[in-house]
Amino acid sequence: MLYTLGHSNHSAGKFLELLRQHGIEAVADVRSQPVSRFSPHFRKRELERLLAEHGIAYVWLPGLGGRPQDPALRDAAGRPDYARMAASAAFGEGLEALKKLASGRRVAVLCSEEDPNRCHRRLLVVKALTGENPALAAEIYHIRKDGSAQAEAELARFDPPPGLW
């Protein structure tokens, strides 16, 4: 089972509570730059230490980040181009690392945006996983700020057909 979670502006305590509530054993950080201006506990070093203190593994997967530095991975207006990003070698390597990490343990894919419908962790990473194996949609959940878990299979029912994004 795979989860996603946006750290939003949660306190460290609330964040840990959400992870514990869902039995998360490892966090896969898919932020391009694991920093936070407003919540220092979500900076890479501090987050890694916080999670280790609570027995949760931390892995940064920059190849799955949503803000590529490579201009070839952006559209004409400079916005990230998810199709190009998903086809890149770095993304493929990151996706394989995520699948290996999630093999046999509960992993939360972490980014900053609370709403999975507005975040690349769902719109890029989860879409790539379910594109390879549509059955995975039944095994992916998005942890929301209230502690509920939205099923990817349920969210996907409302997605526009491929090619309209």
Image: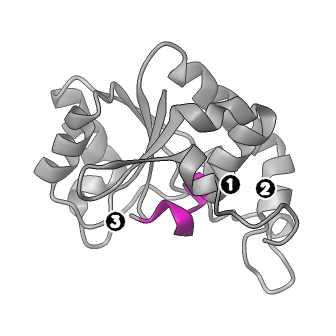
Q: Residue lying at the far top in this picture: please name it.
A: 104
Question: Residue sitting at 63 percent across and 46 percent down?
Answer: 126
Of the residues shown, which amino acid type is indicated by label 2? Met
Mark toward the viewer: 2 or 3: 2
Of the residues shown, which amino acid type is indicated by label 3? Ser
Mark toward the viewer: 1 or 2: 1
Number of other residues with Cα within 10 Å of mark 1, as a class: few under 14, some 14 to 19, many 20 or more = some
N-terminal-most mark, 2 or 3: 3
Q: Is residue 149 left or right of residue 135?
A: left
When asked about the image quadrant of residue 67, the answer is bottom right
Disc 1 secondary structure class: helix
Q: Quadrant of the C terminus?
A: bottom right
Label 1–label 2 contact, CB within 8 A:
yes
Of the residues shown, which amino acid type is indicated by label 1? Leu
Q: Is residue 55 above or below residue 143?
A: above
Distance, label 2 to label 3, CA atoms, is: 23 Å
Q: Is residue 60 above or below residue 150?
A: above
Q: Is residue 36 left or right of residue 33?
A: left
Question: Residue sitting at 46 percent across and 42 percent down?
Answer: 141
Q: Which residue is mark 3?
A: 36
When asked about the image quadrant of residue 40, the answer is bottom left
Question: Residue sitting at 32 percent across and 65 percent down?
Answer: 8
Which stretch appears magenta? 115-122
Disc 2 secondary structure class: helix
> In the rendering, at what x and y percent does residue 108 appear?
42, 38
Number of other residues with Cα within 10 Å of mark 3, as a class: few under 14, some 14 to 19, many 20 or more = some
Disc 3 secondary structure class: loop
Q: Which residue is mark 1?
A: 124
The circle on residue 85 is 2
The circle on residue 104 is none
